[in-house]
Image (cartoon, helix red, strand yellow):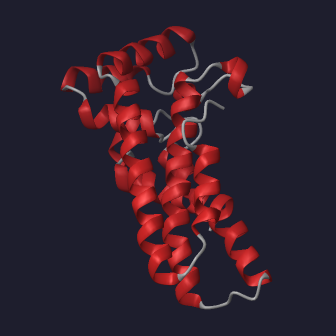
Amino acid sequence: MTSYGQCLDLLSNPPGRKPDFNSFSAERYAAIVKYKTAFYSFCLPVRLAMFMSNWSDMKVHSDAEKILLKMGHFFQVQDDYLDCFGDPEKIGKIGTDIEDGKCCWPIITALHNSTPLQRKQLQDYYGLHNNEAVAKVKAIYRELNIESLYREYEDNTYNEICQLINEITLSSNLPTNIFYGFLSKIHRRSK
């Protein structure tokens, strides 16, 4: 699954070419995130622990996976946001998603909210390896209030995940503390 997600990611921006924004969609991004991040980072460890604990009811595994996939998506959106807006001292790296032309949450959100002129400018500067181009992309992100949109997304998604945890654990007898434990580690993270 991770290889499939990696392949989708690479197909969104083939090496040596400018990104094709026609392939940058919320659906494509969701598929990349689901397969590249959510399964191995969230579903795999929890489901393995469930199997190791002799919890083999596939309905319960399916219920857990619904929560964990949503959490994995949330985590990747945070990672994409931090790549662009995070403090390199805190996150331990300088983000390069803009230079690398990645299909990531800030650009997907910017393209969804941009004017035709802003979209043209993003197309011109996104995926170039120079500081001036990165600064121009970030300036458009500021014009589009991407940071505020992220904060709104973060709050809404946190609430959706909490609601999902409560609904699913009530009907499946999964312990809520497993999911809230994960959620507490990623909610409002800065690295």
Residue drawn 42% across and 65% down? 164
In the rendered view of the protein, which quadrant contains the N terminus?
bottom right
Eyeballing the image, is 166 above or below 52?
A: above
Residue plotted at (38% across, 45% down): 24
Residue 22 location in percent, x, y? 33, 44
Identify the residue at horizontal 52%, vertical 88% (top origin). Answer: 59
Picture quadrant where residue 56 is located: bottom right
Q: Position of residue 10 (x, y in %)?
A: 57, 49
Is any atom of residue 33 visible in this view?
no
Compare residues 42 and 118 and report the one nearer the observer.
42
Task: Give the answer, above or below, for where 60 lies relative to 12.
Answer: below
Horizontally, residue 152 falls left or right of residue 57, namely: left
Tell which of 191 and 17 is nearer to you. Answer: 191
Residue at horizontal 74 percent and vertical 26 percent from the top:
92
Q: Position of residue 93 (x, y in %)?
A: 72, 25
Which quadrant holds the C terminus? top right
The quarter of the picture where residue 43 lies is bottom right
Residue 115 percent location from the top left of the image: 20, 25
Q: Is residue 75 visible?
A: yes
